Amino acid sequence: MGDNCILIVDDEQRMRKLIKDFLVAKGYSILEAEDGEKALEVFENNKNKISLILLDVMMPKLDGWSVLRQIRQESKVPIIMLTARGEEQDELFGFELGVDEYISKPFSPKVLVARVEAILRRTNKDQKEVKSYGGIEIDKEGRTVKVDGKPIELSLREYELLVYLVDNENIALSRDKILNNVWNYDYYGDSRTIDSHIKKIRHKLGKKGKYIKTIRGIGYKFETK
Amino acid sequence: MGDNCILIVDDEQRMRKLIKDFLVAKGYSILEAEDGEKALEVFENNKNKISLILLDVMMPKLDGWSVLRQIRQESKVPIIMLTARGEEQDELFGFELGVDEYISKPFSPKVLVARVEAILRRTNKDQKEVKSYGGIEIDKEGRTVKVDGKPIELSLREYELLVYLVDNENIALSRDKILNNVWNYDYYGDSRTIDSHIKKIRHKLGKKGKYIKTIRGIGYKFETK
DNA sequence: TAAATCACATATATTATATATTATAAATAC
DNA sequence: GTATTTATAATATATAATATATGTGATTTA
C-alpha cells in the first residue's frame, strides 16, 4: 500500500504535467496514462498502490465514463472526473457510478489540490493507525501484528496476505483474486501456494487462526465469528 | 447509528423545505436548524444520529464557517456547504477545515441529492448487499446463507444451486437447464443428481425448504408462497 | 547463509454422484 | 369415484471424486 499514489489520466500531455507538478510538490507520487486503455492497464498493475484517480472524460479510444465503469466493477478507489463546463446531465449519471467529485476545466490548480486532499483526508480517516479484528491488531504504519496484545512475527507475504483478507473482511475471496492482489497480477504460480501461507498464518494466529475461514471450492474469507 | 439522518442548516425556511422534500422522498430522515447557534445545539443533541450536514454559509448570528469550525473540533461528520456563486477563495479555506463538498446556489435539487448520496455511499462502506427471500437471506459477497437469521452451511454445489433457483424466482426450471447452468455444460451425469442436492438444501432450509417447489416432469421452482 | 517463498506429494476431510429403495402423484381402467 | 397401474420424485447409503491441510525439500531472495 504505497502512500498516496495518484493516477492522472488525460490525453493532453500538458495537462498531465501541470497537475503532476502541483501534486508532486505536495508530496504525492504520480502515475500517468494518456488514454483509457492505458489507464486500465496501469490500474491493473498498481491496484494496491493507487489511492485516487483523476480521470478526464474526453479521451480517444476509451472515454472516461467507460474507464470509470470498468474500474468500479472491482474497486472503490476514489475517482475525480475532469470535465468541460456545462455537463450537468452527465454529473448525475456519474454519481450513480460512484464518481466522487467533478472538477471542470479550466480549473485552478489550487482548487484541484484542495479537492484531492479533502477526498484523501476523508478516505484515510478510517485508516486508523491500528485496527483490531476480534483481538488481532494490525498496525499498518508499523507493519506489525499483535494477537491478544502479544506481537507475532509475519513474513512479507504472510503479512500482506493477512492484510488483504482483513481489508476484505466478510468477503469470500477466490484463490485467483488473492493471487492477483497479493501476488503480482502476472504471477502464474501454483495456487496451492496460498494454502501454505494460510497454514502458517493460522498457526501464528493461534486460536484466532479460525477467523480465516476456508470456502471450499472458492478460497478463503476472514470473519471474526 | 441512526440510518442516514441529515441536518439541514439554512435561514430561509423555503430553502429548507425544498431540500427536505427531496431528501425525504429518498428516504432520509431530516433535522433542521435556522441559524448557526441552533445548528450547534441540534448537533450536540443528535451527534450519533446525524450522518451528514448541509450547511449554508450566509446566516445571521453565527455563519456557516464558524459552525463548521466548531463541529470539526469534535466530529468528522461529512459536511456540504451551500454557498452563493463565485466564492473560490472561500472554497480553499473550507477544504482545509474539512468541508466535503460545495454546492452553489441556485442548484438543481437532483444534483444535491446525487451529491448527498455519493458522499454517504462513500462513508457507509459497510452497506453489504444481502437479499432476503421469504426469510432466506443470501449474502453473495460472503457466500453465506441465513434462515430466519441463523446461518446455515451449504456446500459449493448446494450454494450455487440455491442461488440459481433464487435468482430465477418464480420460474420453473427444467433439470436440463439446471445442469447447464449450475454444473458445467459439458457435464453428462445423471440428472437425478439434482434431486439429491435439492433434498439436502430443503433439509437445511428447514421449514422454508418448501419454497423449493417440485414441478413434476420438468424440474424445480423457487417460490416463497 | 539464513530466512522466506514456493512447488509438490501425501494424508485427510469433505463433497458429489450413482444406485437402490421407498414414497408419492398422475393416469388409466373399472 | 375408487382402485390399479405407471411414472416420477424423495430418500438413504455407499462409493467415487475432489479439495484442502500438512510436511518436506528445492529454489529464490535479502
Image (cartoon, coloured by chain):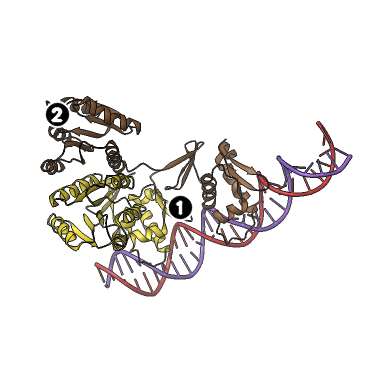
Chain colours: A yellow, B brown, C purple, D red
Pick whichever, B42 or C20, lies toward us.
B42
Q: In which quarter of the image is residue A37?
A: bottom left
Res B87 seen here = yes
Residue A187: where, in percent of width, then height? 36, 66
> Label 1 near label 2: C-beta < 8 Å?
no
Determine whether B11 is above or below D20 in the image: above
Determine whether B129 is above or below A191 in the image: above
Q: Residue beneath label 1, please?
A: A215
- At 21% from the left and 61% from the top, the residue drawn is A12
Residue B98: where, in percent of width, then height? 17, 41
Tell me the element at label 2. loop
**Res. B33 mark:** none
Please, what is the three-letter code of the amino acid marked with disc 2? Met
Q: Specify whether A24 is left or right of A65.
A: left
Q: How crowded is mark 1: few (under 14 residues within 10 Å), some or many (20 or more)?
A: some
Q: Specify whether A172 is left or right of A124.
A: right
Residue C25: where, in percent of width, then height? 71, 40
Pick whichever, B80 or B198, lies toward us.
B80
Residue A204: where, in percent of width, then height? 35, 54
- At 27% from the left and 62% from the top, the residue drawn is A35
**Distance (Cα) linking label 2 and label 1:** 56 Å
Quadrant containing the N terminus of chain A is bottom left
Q: Count the labels in the image.
A: 2
**Res. B59 mark:** 2
Quadrant containing the C terminus of chain A is top left
